[in-house]
Image: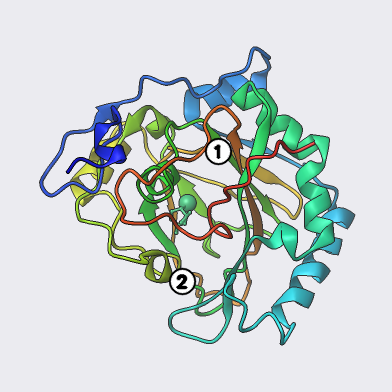
């Protein structure tokens, strides 16, 4: 029997069982008509850095908010909270805009949702929200990956028409687990080897092993393009394409690297059945409410 997923034409096949070549992306990165130096950088590199997207005072208020959430005993056993694999520290809190009114307000802020609308050229809805705490000493990194690869395979996102905004709440330094990106890698889709295990998210959100590129593919992407890093003060932000190759190292410094991470998807790119998983992930990880953000 052929399933619905098998009958769809899929230009971004992944979770394959053998070696597969890199795939050139045919979809644009910037879908809107607005022109600006920032959008040109985003189009060329797959990301752009925005200094002081939020004021230092706004960032400081959000730090108090995420510290409050982190120490809330009721949240400790909430399924939206992910604990580090090797310690009992909070790693991430998902769907955080439904937990924190100040983050819900941030999502709707024109400086935030407006940026996503400019890139995606349509109304947008929130696909995922989370705080990544990246604690000091034993904050585990995130291995190289393309977010779109996971959202396509496990959430049924058809095209790379989504954009992420990572806002620094604490200083993002070169040595405390800041995000590394391969400039220009958003133009290449990297098929990943290995079948998606059931309920893969329970493992992947702490340590991802399936849905990661081969070392050969990462080397090929980085050769000639190099690797850039997002560093910045609290309130600065990284806007990045859903398919850009990125990752972060472990944070063994005493300085936590906490960011709020918001993913907007185009309302013209809503989720269907997963392309390479037996069941969709829960809505707190991949929203199925496609109501535009206004
Ligand atoms: O699962 C997600 O939606 C995101 N998190 C990880 C660790 N990898 C894929 C994607 O970035
Ligand atoms: Fe990611």
- Residue matched to label 1: 240
Question: Does the image show residue 11?
Answer: no
Q: Compute the Cα span from label 2 to label 1.
A: 21 Å
Q: Secondary structure at mark 2?
A: loop
Element type where label 1 sits in the image? strand
Q: Which mark is residue 140?
A: 2
Q: Residue at x 43, y 37 (%)?
A: 243
Q: Does residue 7 appear in the picture of this structure?
A: yes
Q: How is the image coloured?
A: rainbow
Quarter location, residue 209: bottom left
Which percent across, then down, holds residue 12? 30, 33
Say whether marks 2 and 1 touch (CB < 8 Å).
Answer: no
Q: Residue at x 20, y 55 (%)?
A: 194
Identify the residue at horizontal 21%, vertical 56% (top origin): 195
Instruction: Name the image quarter holding residue 41.
Output: top right
Q: Along the line of sight, which residue is nearer the eye, 47 or 251?
A: 47
> On screen, 220 above or below 201?
above
The location of residue 1, given as percent across then percent down, is 17, 43
Residue at the image position 66 percent from the left and 33 percent from the top? 124
Q: Residues within 10 Å of mark 2 (few under 14, many from 20)?
A: many
275 over 211 or under it: above or below: above
Look at the numbered disc 2 and say if its residue's Cβ is closer than 8 Å to ligand 1.
no
| On-image quarter of the C terminus | top right
Q: CB of residue at label 1: within 8 Å of ligand 2?
A: no
Name the residue at the right extreme: 57
Above or below 116: residue 289: below
Residue 68 is left or right of residue 90, and the answer is right
Residue 133, x across and y down, in percent: 62, 68
- Quarter-wise, where is residue 248 in the image? bottom left
Residue 292 pos. (x, y %): 71, 36
- The outermost residue toward the left is 18
N-terminal label among 2 and 1: 2
């Amino acid at each position: 029997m052929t399933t619905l997923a098998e009958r769809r034409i899929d230009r971004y096949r992944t979770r394959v069982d053998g070696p597969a070549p890199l795939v050139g992306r045919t979809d644009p990165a910037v879908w809107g008509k607005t022109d600006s130096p920032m959008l040109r950088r985003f189009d060329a590199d797959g990301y752009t850095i925005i200094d002081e997207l939020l004021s230092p005072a706004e960032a400081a208020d959000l730090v108090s908010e995420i510290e409050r959430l982190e120490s809330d005993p009721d949240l400790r056993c909430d399924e939206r909270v992910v604990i580090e694999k090797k310690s009992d520290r909070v790693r991430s809190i998902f769907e955080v805009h439904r937990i924190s009114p100040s983050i819900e307000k941030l999502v709707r802020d024109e400086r935030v949702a407006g940026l996503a609308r400019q890139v995606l050229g349509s109304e947008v809805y929130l696909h995922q929200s989370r705080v990544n705490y990246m604690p000091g000493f034993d904050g585990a990194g995130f291995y190289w990956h393309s977010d779109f690869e996971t959202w396509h395979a496990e959430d049924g996102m058809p095209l790379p028409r989504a954009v992420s905004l990572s806002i620094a709440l604490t200083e993002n330094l070169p040595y405390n687990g800041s995000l590394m990106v391969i400039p220009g890698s958003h133009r290449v889709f990297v098929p990943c080897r290995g079948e998606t295990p059931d309920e893969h998210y329970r493992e992947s959100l702490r340590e991802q092993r399936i849905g990661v590129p081969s070392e050969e593919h990462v080397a090929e992407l980085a050769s000639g393009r190099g690797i850039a890093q997002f560093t910045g003060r609290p309130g600065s932000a990284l806007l990045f394409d859903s398919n850009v190759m990125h990752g972060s190292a472990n944070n063994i410094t005493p300085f936590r690297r906490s960011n709020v991470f918001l993913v907007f998807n185009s309302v013209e790119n809503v989720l269907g059945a997963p392309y390479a998983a037996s069941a969709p992930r829960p809505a707190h990880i991949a929203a199925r409410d496609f109501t535009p953000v206004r």
